[in-house]
Structures are given as structure tokens and as C-alpha cells.
Image: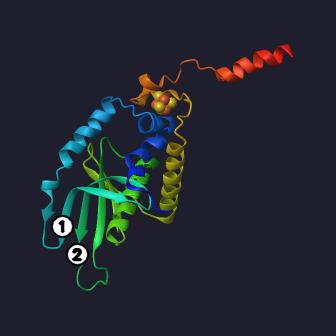
Amino acid sequence: MAFAEDECLPISALQHFLFCERRAALIHIEGLWASNQFTVEGDHLHTRVDDPSASENRAAAKIVRSLGLCSLRHGLVGKADLVEFIRPPESTDVEYEIHVVEYKRGKPKAKLDLPFRVQLCAQAFCIEDMLGYPVTAAFLYFGMTRRRVEVPLDENLRQTTLNTIERLHALIATGKTPLPVYKPRKCKACSLIDLCLPTAPRPRTTARTYLQSLFDETE
Ligand code: SF4
């Protein structure tokens, strides 16, 4: 099944969804947004690298920055920070090697975060759909260490990414924002905490259910 253009969701929504489904819904159903230190630092890093005019031509490689991405098959739109198109030595039968690179603030952890890996894999899906060539390698570049770490685009990650895309679209199609599940470490790092109010008391039932229960008690 292919999506219509206006049904496409930003690739970044996958990251929000894996971090917290309510966060993805607050942003993509309710249209809310707020920044914090982490989002500002991330934006700053991307502003430095998102310059399409800085694309480079070298003899054996073309480097494209801030490449616009779209896949109607997956219902996704977005941007790749950097894509390298490399012409391998004539002896190989691969026509081009394609590398996709996503910039992240901070430094790599021992186990790379799943949301980062899924975001990168979704970018690879878009490039593969747009160009018809496989993406041969994917990397996360960390601003603090100035190092690239390769993310294997293996079958496991591809399947996890497909499932996440499907679940994200299903959530957005409901038009309903899930209730918060307060997790102190996660919520304190979330830029939407003051809009989400994860610790505020909430009625467990709707008004209709409450009124019906009053009558049920007297019957
Ligand atoms: S504050 Fe917590 S529950 Fe609310 S959107 Fe953020 S992570 Fe999710």
C-alpha cells in the first residue's frame, strides 16, 4: 500500500515514537512543541551541517548534504544530513556505494540507541526507494567525539524499522493521544514535560461513564 503525500510523516517522528508514544502524539496529532537544552544543541549541530551548497565533488565520490527524502511506500519524508555516493574501483561489479550519515550531539554509548538506528534505517529506506540502489553503509557521527560509528543495516534492524513505521502510522491514524506513563529519567529529559504534565492527576473515567456509574449504584 502506498501513502498519499499528505499522509507522509517526518522520519524524526519515529525517534519520538520510540522514546515515548505520547510524545509522538503530542507533536504529530496535537501540533505541540517545546525546546530544551538537548533539542537546542541538536538543532545547532544540524544547522552547521545542513547546508546543501556545501556538497562536494571528488574524483571518486560525490558528497551531498541535507538531501531531501521521501518514500510514499513507507509514508515518510525527511532529510539526510549527509549522503556519500562512491564509485568503487572498476574491478567490482557494484555500480555505486551509497553511505548515509546522521549527525548527533553527544557521544556514542556502548549500545547505540534504538531510536537513532531506526531513524537512520528509515533514511536508508527512503534513499533506496528514491534511487533504486541499496544503501551500502550507514553511520552516526557524534559531535562530542567527532567520530563516526557504523550502524549495520541488517535484517533485524530493517524489520524493527518496518514495524515501528507501521505502529507510528497506526497511532497517528487514531487521532488519540495516549495517557502519560511517568518515567522520571525519561520525562525529565523530555522537552514536552510542561505540556504533557505526566504527574498531574487524571480522571480514570469519562464524564459519561462517571454519570452512568451514579445511576448504576441506585438501581
Ligand atoms: S513527559 Fe514523559 S510521558 Fe510526557 S511526553 Fe515526555 S516522555 Fe512522554
- The answer to which of marks 1 and 2 sits earlier in the sequence is 1
Instruction: Check if mark 1's residue and mark 2's residue have beta carbons within 8 Å.
Output: no
Q: How many labels does the image show?
A: 2
Mark 1 Cβ inside 8 Å of ligand 1: no
Question: Is residue 125 depicted above or below 190 in this figure?
Answer: below
Q: How far apart are marks 1 and 2 (CA)?
A: 9 Å
Question: Left of 117 or right of it: where is 107?
Answer: left
* Secondary structure of residue under mark 2: loop
Residue under label 1, please give it. 62
Quarter containing the C terminus: top right
Decide which of 12, 136 is in the foreground and name it: 12
Question: Left of 54 or right of it: where is 75?
Answer: right
* Residue 113 visible at all: no
Q: Tell me the residue at 40%/34% (across/down).
A: 31
- Residue density around tag 2, few if under 14, some if 14–19, many if 20 or more, within 10 Å: some
Decide which of 75, 13 is in the foreground and name it: 75
Q: Residue furthest top?
A: 218
Amino acid type of the residue that numbered disc 1 sits on in the rendered structure: Lys
Mark 2 Cβ inside 8 Å of ligand 1: no
Decide which of 150, 51 is in the foreground and name it: 51
- x, y (%) of residue 161? 48, 56
Question: Left of 119 or right of it: where is 168?
Answer: right
Amino acid type of the residue that numbered disc 2 sits on in the rendered structure: Arg
Residue under label 2, please give it. 87
In the picture, residue 46 is in which quadrant?
Answer: top left
Decide which of 195, 86 is in the foreground and name it: 195
Q: Tell me the residue at 55%/34% (across/down).
A: 178
Q: Tell me the residue at 29%/39% (across/down).
A: 42
- x, y (%) of residue 104? 31, 45
* Secondary structure of residue under mark 1: strand
